[in-house]
Amino acid sequence: MSLDFLTAHELAGKLRSKEISVRQLTEAALDRIRSLDGAVHAFITVDEAGAFLAADHAQKRLDDGDPSPLLGIPIAVKDNMCTRGLLTTCGSKILEGYKPSYNATAVQKLHDAGMVLIGKTNLDEFAMGSSTEYSHYGPSHNPWDLDRVPGGSSGGSAASVCAGMTPLALGSDTGGSIRQPAALTGIVGMKPTYGRVSRYGLVAFSSSLDQIGPFARDVTDCAQLLNVICGHDELDATSLDMPVPDFTRALSKDVGGLRIGVPKEFMGDGIEAGVRDTVQAALGVLEQAGASIEEASLPSTEYGVATYYIIAPCEASSNLARYDGVRFGYRTKSDAGHVDLVEQTREEGFGEEVKRRILIGTYALSAGYYDAYYLHAQKVRTKMRMEFEELFERFDVIAGPTSPTVAFKIGEFDDDPLSLKMADLLTIPANMLGTCAISVNCGFSEGLPVGLQIIGKPFDEETVLRAAFAYEHRTDWHTRRPPIA
């Protein structure tokens, strides 16, 4: 019996009926990783001993009648979330050998739910990228075509779920780093509203934009994992103290009367024709199901990438100042004095993309340039938020493509970094607003997956999940498996 591509809720049913044990399920996941990860490179660290220990604990809870829905289910975690006693690298040389003394709150919630942490997944260094090519540990590969990227920066987590290594994974989304790789690998990926999930223990890139969220094989699994990780946390000042619903109750096939706005900027220049046509067909499915589809406009979309690449590097230059070779991680061999130690550690420890963003951020925050760059970018961000708020007075959700293109080839944009940054064109707006958004597979172009993005009002994950579930129920794209299977 193959367990590789069963959903988490299907696996949970088999565990409770005693068709399989948690240890057998864990071994199956580890076997899959052993056989495929040499080609996919989804993982930086695999924790076999810890996984089997967690599996035995979960089995005891199952035998004792614990009803936790995801008890015993394997999961992978992006390697920018702290894991007690387990290597946490952020895909960077500068965190070489770093093992935190505590768990990120989201990781601790997985443990509390009885899930089995299999290992830590690959990412663009410090989550700065859209392809998972900028990792100190080498690029990850898309299971649909190993010559192509899985998206980024959470590409390892997306590849793990896509390739059947783990049914679930966690990623982080700063400018689209969950939704874009979900689209490029043909799975479900969701960015919750900023403040829904604690960022405590998530190694900071851009503190006003970062948010942890789930990868899954279907919308039901996504909702169940959201139930686990959401909630107020006193250890995170940006975590909001508000009720968390049972997201699985929102999973309705009925979208009658749902008002969907489609910004013309999301379907215009720069969007591949195959992507545009596939998304149009997906919107037609929702319209036939009873939703109303109407063209809308978000004029500031064209400024989103430029605004993001001021705000995010500014916050990154501040957050990454702590890596100095003194307290933890990599330290240069140079011994010419304290200043030289810090400079050489950062020169040797950070990759080129991280250095570029630190330099951009430091420049934009410097005296004489702050108003012209950072302050101006924040004003544009406010303008974008106002445009969204106006649209949400007319529509329940906003929809369009997740990514302007299908997965591109590894190395394709080595000499064209600007084009690579445009991969986040359609996902950045939700981060600027801080709201929730999901990507679901809606078909294929050139034999590669295309993602439908559904953006909701802040803290209205339920409507987003409802729309995604209704679409998924009427199609079978989410059941397609990559040829690596």
Image (cartoon, grey):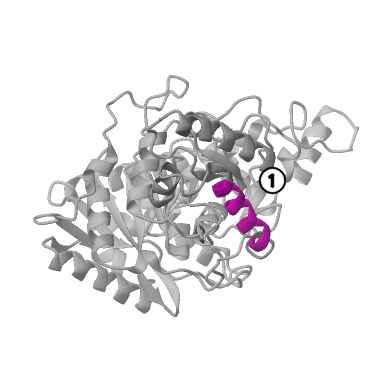
Task: Please state if 333 lies on the left or on the right of 330 as rendered.
Answer: right
Task: Please state if 391 lies on the left or on the right of 45 as rendered.
Answer: left
Q: Tell me which segment is drawn in magenta.
A: 24-36
Mark 1 lies on residue: 92
Q: Name the residue at 89% across, 37% down.
A: 334
Q: Main secondary structure of the magenta part?
A: helix
Q: Is residue 440 magenta?
A: no
Relative to 417, does residue 97 appear above or below in the rendering? above
Q: Is residue 27 magenta?
A: yes
Q: Name the residue at 8% across, 55% down.
A: 257
Q: Does residue 285 show up?
A: yes
Give the percent coordinates (x, y) of residue 159: 54, 59
Relative to 180, does residue 325 appear above or below in the rendering? above
Q: Name the residue at 28% across, 40% down.
A: 247
Q: Amino acid at mark 1?
A: Ser
Give the percent coordinates (x, y) of residue 58: 52, 34
Q: Residues within 10 Å of mark 1 (few under 14, many from 20)?
A: many
Relative to 358, does residue 297 appear above or below in the rendering? below
Relative to 83, does residue 222 appear above or below in the rendering? below
Give the percent coordinates (x, y) of residue 451: 37, 64
